[in-house]
């Protein structure tokens, strides 16, 4: 009954928050990148099945969805402006584009790792306390590194109590299997494979820190301000895809099978990965998390980790880079906001006004 009024209100909200003009010219085709992880694969499916294209047509724009298998390369290319958006985790969104001065918006919070990332320690019946004095293989300055610090903090230890053994992601399995390191920090499906193949204990995983390793679709803020249609189209495509993959019927099962193929994984491995991912299937759940008091607290902790490991460029403190959240909350410098957790477009999905 009141749809025209609600659409007008939604447009006014977008104009006020993003400072855009209805006459702004679109830079087309827009380009967004994804990689084959639990938070990224749905974008590959949405592109392959023309879901993104359908939503783009609705707003009379064009969007290219590009798979970049090398996650580090995707970070570099997005930060350099070669993509308008990319699937990133929250740590990397801060330490790469934001730390380089690229103002970015977390357009969609897809969910978080809820057991997909973990720490294995060689031997049975061991706990996080037993990491003390051990050599730990991991990808340095990554969410794995962050997870290790959280595990150590949970048992009143620090990085000084272990020996870090940095290694490339491709070499984690070989390093752990060789016995060069007593512990490894990794993610599924490799985490499950190493646990099954070795005499190991899972001493800590991301289930212990819910909501701290986030899966995001991050978009350049300037592009989003000038072209809110991009935000609308991506948000609509994402939640349509989530609805399809969450269906508890044969059609839903077929979607999951297709995503496993896109990810290059066995179906069982992909299903196991999904089972340890807390996905925000509905926009209401995503908005609720975006508006929570927990999110700014988490990002403050992430900023402190990043600064302590010299990942914030020339920042003089963990507060040097500002991050904004719902309800006017700001963490860090209000004068230098470079990462924005803005639920406006997800709220439009809740309201049915996309």
Image (spheres, rainbow, N blue to C red):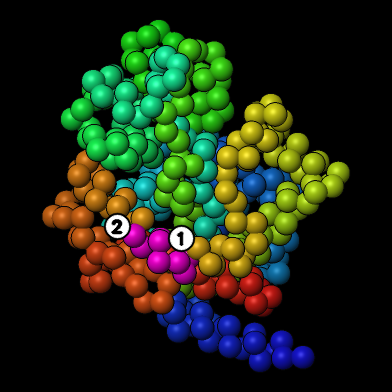
Q: Residue at x 70, y 29 (%)?
A: 268
- In the rendering, at what x and y percent does residue 82 appear? 44, 50
Residue 163: image x %, image y %?
Answer: 23, 22
Residue at far top of view: 178
Choose between 321 and 162: the one closer to the eye: 162
Where is 333 relative to 276, above or below? below
The part of the image, by quadrant, that contains residue 57 is bottom right
Left or right placement of residue 259 versus residue 171 in this view: right
Tag 2 secondary structure? helix
The reply to whether dot 1 and dot 2 touch (C-beta < 8 Å) is no
Query: How many residues crowd around disc 1 within 10 Å: few (fewer than 14), some, or many (20 or more)?
Result: many
> Which numbered disc covers residue 300?
2
**Residue 340 sits above or below residue 133 on the image:** below
The quarter of the displayed image where residue 260 is located: top right
- Where residue 106 is drawn, which disc sits there? 1
Q: Is residue 105 left or right of residue 271?
A: left
Furthest residue in direction right, as rendered: 250
Q: Residues within 10 Å of mark 2 (few under 14, many from 20)?
A: some
Residue 168 locus on image (x, y percent) = 37, 24
Kind of element beneath mark 1: strand
Q: Quadrant of the C terminus?
A: bottom right
- Numbered tag placed on residue 304 in the rendering: none
- Start and end of the magenta stretch? 290-297
Image point 32% across, 40% down: which residue? 154
Q: Is residue 284 left or right of residue 179?
A: right
Q: How many marks?
A: 2
Quarter of the image that includes the N terminus: bottom right
Overall secondary structure of the magenta section? helix
The reply to whether residue 238 is visible in this rendering is yes
Mark 1 and mark 2: span between their CA atoms? Answer: 16 Å
């Amino acid at each position: 009954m009141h749809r025209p009024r609600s659409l007008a209100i939604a447009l006014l909200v977008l104009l006020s928050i993003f400072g855009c003009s209805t006459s702004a010219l679109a830079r087309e085709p827009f380009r967004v990148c994804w990689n084959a992880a639990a938070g990224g694969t749905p974008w590959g499916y949405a592109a392959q099945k023309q879901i993104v294209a359908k939503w783009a047509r609705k707003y009379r724009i064009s969007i290219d969805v590009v798979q970049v298998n090398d996650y580090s390369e995707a970070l570099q290319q997005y930060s350099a402006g070669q993509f308008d958006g990319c699937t990133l985790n929250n740590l990397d969104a801060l330490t790469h584009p934001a730390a380089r001065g690229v103002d970015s918006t977390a357009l969609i919070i897809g969910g978080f790792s809820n057991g997909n990332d973990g720490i294995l320690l060689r031997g049975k019946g061991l706990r996080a306390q037993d990491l003390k004095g051990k050599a730990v293989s991991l990808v340095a300055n990554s969410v794995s590194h962050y997870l290790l610090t959280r595990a150590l903090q949970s048992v009143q230890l620090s990085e000084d109590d272990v020996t870090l053994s940095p290694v490339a992601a491709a070499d984690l399995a070989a390093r752990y299997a060789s016995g060069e390191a007593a512990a490894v920090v990794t993610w599924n499906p490799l985490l499950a494979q190493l646990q099954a193949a070795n005499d190991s204990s899972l001493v800590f995983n991301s289930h212990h820190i819910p909501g701290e390793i986030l899966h995001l679709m991050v978009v350049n803020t300037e592009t989003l301000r000038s072209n809110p249609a991009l935000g609308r189209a991506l948000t609509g495509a994402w939640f349509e895809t989530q609805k399809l993959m969450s269906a508890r019927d044969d059609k839903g099962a077929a979607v999951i099978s297709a995503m496993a193929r896109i990810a290059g994984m066995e179906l069982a491995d992909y299903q196991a990965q999904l089972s340890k991912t807390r996905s925000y299937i509905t926009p209401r759940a995503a908005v609720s998390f975006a508006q929570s008091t927990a999110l700014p607290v988490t990002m403050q902790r992430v900023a402190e980790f990043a600064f302590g490991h010299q990942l914030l460029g020339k920042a003089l403190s963990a507060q040097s880079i500002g991050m904004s959240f719902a309800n006017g909350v700001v963490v860090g410098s209000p004068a230098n906001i470079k990462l924005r957790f803005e639920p406006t477009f997800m709220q439009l999905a809740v309201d049915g006004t996309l």
